[in-house]
Image (tube, rainbow, N blue to C red):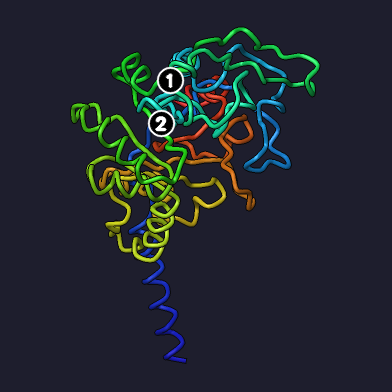
Amino acid sequence: MRLLRYAFVVCVVVSAALWFNNTSLWSPGGQPLLLAHRGLAQTYQTRGLDAQTCTASRIHPPEHRYIENTIASMAAAFEAGADIVEFDIHPTTDKQFAVFHDWTLDCRTDGHGVTRQASMADLRKLDLGHGYTSDGGKTYPFRGEFVGQMPTMDDVLTRFPDKRFLIHVKSNDPKEGELLADRLMALPTPRLRQLIVYGGNAPINVLRQRMPGLRTASRNTMKQCATQYLALSWSGHVPADCANSMIMLPTNYGRWAWGWPNLLVARLRSVNTEVFVIGANAGEDFSSGIDSPVDALQIPQGFAGGIWTNRVDRIAPLFAARK
């Protein structure tokens, strides 16, 4: 009996210590950072989605006149309340970085072929809204509206010199990491602090070697950070694998992370890493966002981390109302 009492007391003390060391009760709250995925873009049906799906052919009926990865969509996202905008890049044959999502041009545009096998001059001739339809091809509501509007990464960074961006490298080619490092290393340090780069393991490894202070992430780095954090950070220690990066945390996983919500955010920011909450994960191989009032209810009051959304126009007012 005495041994059982001793074991019970030990369990209570250990549990209390773990709770005290990982509660967010004493961590300052605040307003979240809203990340607009691809700017203010058209959303689409995600059922049955795979890597080959032409998402422009399954958009929802349009509620606004913007399409992804354009200067206009980014400006609209910032105007709606975004703190950070995510955009996608591909290298071109003339060693620029085109801001465009798809590996090929055929789905969204009136062009054909692999995006990175074209010059920027040719890409600027395309109609970016050519392939968008919400009714199976009966109508194409954006045709003719976005001719010549594909920007370069340099265009974006010049147009928004004081804004924060998440840059998505769409390949797993280490040469792309080298080319991107060459371009980014020409930027001043204060500008680099406003950027995060994520993508394939190989180009991100190159960026990490050449620019160790730049925040970068790949699937591997996020997995390594999460594994180490869950194993060690009950103690308050933040693993080195979590430094200078970002993590994407589904809403249904957050409560299992030590320090959730705001102590987790504070710990990772102390090592120059951002936490972005995304939609609940049910085993899909794609990332959903916090896109509706129902999704927003999954975010704790006073959450000060990042929120990944495809509909910043809907979400920003909801969190502004929480102030």
Label 1: how many residues lie within 10 Å, few (<14), some (14-19) or many (20+)? many
In front: 42, or 185?
185
- Residue 27 appearing in the image: no
Distance of mark 1 from mark 2, alpha carbons?
9 Å
Instruction: Tally the numbered discs.
Output: 2
Q: Position of residue 56 (x, y in %)?
A: 66, 26
Left or right: 209 as drawn, with respect to 286:
left
Which residue appears farthest toward the top when viewing the image?
A: 144
On residue 279, which mark appears?
A: none
Left or right: 189 as drawn, with respect to 239:
left
Q: Which residue is mark 1?
A: 120
- Identify the residue shown where x is 42% and y is 91%: 2
On residue 91, which mark appears?
A: 2
- Identify the residue shown where x is 35% and y is 13%: 159
- Residue 172 appearing in the image: yes
Q: Position of residue 100 (x, y in %)?
A: 50, 26
Amino acid, disc 2: Pro
Amino acid, disc 1: Met
Q: Position of residue 138 (x, y in %)?
A: 81, 16
Query: What secondary structure is found at the residue carrying circle 2?
Result: strand
Label 2: how many residues lie within 10 Å, few (<14), some (14-19) or many (20+)? many
Look at the picture and state if 111 lies above or below 208.
above
In front: 139, or 25?
139
In front: 120, or 273?
120
In front: 37, or 102?
102
Q: Position of residue 278 (x, y in %)?
A: 52, 40
Which corner quadrant of the image does residue 262 belong to?
Answer: top left
